[in-house]
Amino acid sequence: MGCIFGAASLNGSPIPGGHIERMASAVVRLNAGRPVFERKGRVCLAYAPRRIAPEGQGGRQPVVGRGGNSLSLFHGVLGNRKDLIAELDLSRSPQPLDDGAVASAAMERWGEAAPSHFRGDFALAHWEEELGRLTLATDPLGRCALYYVLDKEVLFFSSMLPPLLASPSLDRSLDEPFLVDFLTDAPSSKSGTFFKAIRRVPAASRLIFEEGKTPEVRTYWEPDWTRTLRLAHDEAYVEMGRALLDQAVRRMLRGPGPTVSLLSGGLDAASVVATAARLLAPETIFTLTAHPPEGVPWLERPGKFSDERFLARQTAAFQANIRAEFISSASLHPLDEDPRQVFKTIGMPVRNPLSLGWFAPLFERAKSLGADRLLTGASGNHGLSWEGMEALPTLAKRGEWRALARETLAISKRSGRSPWKVWKSDVVFPALPEAAKRRWLKWRHPEQSAVHHAIAIRPEFVAEMGRDGWEVKWLPGDATTRRSRWLTALQARPLHNTAFGALFGLDFLDPLGDRDLLEFCYAVPDDQYLRHGVTRWLARRVLADRLPPAVIQETRIGDQCPEFLHRMTLQRPALRQALDQVERSPLVRRVLDVPRMKALEARWPDDVQSARFVDYGAVLHRSLHVAQFIQWAEEGAPLS
């Protein structure tokens, strides 16, 4: 896992001594490689190298621009690198053309418009000496982080948090509104972090710093939510979807070592695996699937499946060059037992700490196979595999009553719900004004807010931060409203894919977040996602040429860490001790309902089926993880 970082003086004064050195020491502790420095006038840029693509091994960063008047840093992967080389007329370059060199040439040719030409996950920094201008930018979903601190007239930045936390003068006070948004799963500020003094370059944006001017954020990409793609027939959408999916996966199939992907029983991960296998054949692709350990009871819930091996095996057997491995562990991982190691490495808590320990053996297996990158399908739900139920309120809004009645009856038949229940929950409620939806929720749950039900946050703290606990990001609505909210939530979320990469030395690449594929999916009409009561109709047709019928037809959702009670029971003595420790913190007591957490620990369930995951996996375990992070931050966020 590599890292870019640096500092720039915005008033011409020298960069304070020792700061860059402390940042470099923090990077070395993260096992990102020994940094390479380049100084020019009032700026110092540094790159800790990583191995992401064969063509990148001969390159060097920071990249010095033509004439020596600019410096560039690039972190990530340019999926359309070959296209950029052709557009920039770089094919005859005598120098090695790694992604950093291509990105630097693009910045010199197109200036601040360059990021709009890029496809892939990236963060970049570009310094122009004559103008005294520093440009920072990140990819459309913000999957590669770039954090910064403006200390008087000196800007410090890094693609990871610990190098910024290494400064002894940094104010480590927590950003309490951001903490509320994290705990309540509300879309937070795209520029926020857990620390007041540290900001983040917003996704799909350039942040420009120039002497004597106020820093300026300029967005370079935003979906056109008014665009609707009208093709001649249903099959045309399938053909276009397949072509764009192939292109998206091909863009991520770069790098040394074997190709390794996560594989679940759902459509998203399976679509990435199957497409990669077709493109790579006869080269082998390795897949890793987590499953509950034998002899350990796990939770079974309606509409979900807890063991994904059957469907994963179906996908793997469908193409000869897929080598599937199935991994489980009945014991705790070191990260389960020492969450402070997580904080020291990534500078933040994770949303699902139980899943971190559950997936850790898969990530370690990927490393043992020699992989530096891991393919995932994390972005599929708001793109290719969009469910499509939002078509119902849209039909009602348009007055297409016959089509609405037909779909309502078909959904009723497939789901087993009465037509009235389908109409009430999927047509009437989504069509209500937002204020009416919140009033209805408060009427149904007068005793507590929705977020307090699912997390141990204190309602008084939520109110103190100016929230009411009912700003639920997944509140039903039409397709455009929900998708725009979903995109905002993705862009604003803490970057756990980057964090996991730092913990395990992997780059997580998600082809389903490809910008061209997403723009197609956003423009596809609603009736391509829902037809005759079949949800995810587009994805099921697009993937029919590469996945087995059992996977295509599955409507249940996979359940992560279904043996959660077993794993938490192993931790129970440590959980009890940790609860006593965090209760000593005034800030923890102000933010979280520790007595409620202690009460859950005291009435430990006898079996997993009687244990509600929301109580033990979220209200207790996730809340305690955040409490431990708060306490670590109160201690000054020590990195060693």
Image (tube, helix red, strand yellow):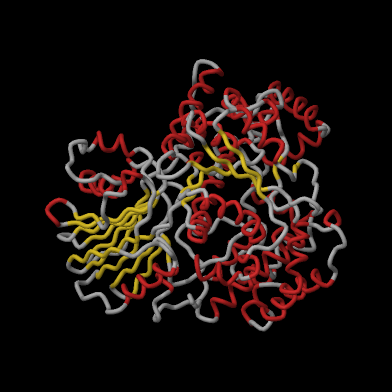
480 sits to left or right of 418 = left
In the image shown, does 17 or 527 lie closer to the viewer?
17
Q: Is residue 612 left or right of residue 210?
A: right
- Give the percent coordinates (x, y) of residue 481: 57, 42
Q: Which residue is painted at 70% across and 23% down in the image? A: 532
Q: Which of 309 and 306 lies nearest the eye of the viewer?
A: 309
Image coords of residue 47 (percent x, y): 32, 60
User: Relative to the observer, which residue lies in front, 574 or 31?
Assistant: 31
Tell me which residue sits at (25%, 70%) in the image: 9
Q: Residue placed at 36% from the left, 75% from the top?
A: 22
Residue 427 visible at all: no
Q: Residue furthest top?
A: 232
Q: Is residue 199 visible?
A: yes
Q: Tell me: residue 59, above or below residue 393.
A: below
Residue furthest left in the image: 67
Q: Position of residue 549 (x, y in %)?
A: 68, 25
| Residue 341 position in % (x across, y down) | 55, 70
Q: Is residue 469 above or below residue 229?
A: below
**Residue visible at 49% across and 19% down in the picture:** 231
Locate residue 359: give its quadrant: bottom right
Label count reads 0
Q: Tell me the quarter of the picture where residue 31 sits.
A: bottom left
User: In the picture, which quadrant includes the N terminus?
Assistant: bottom left
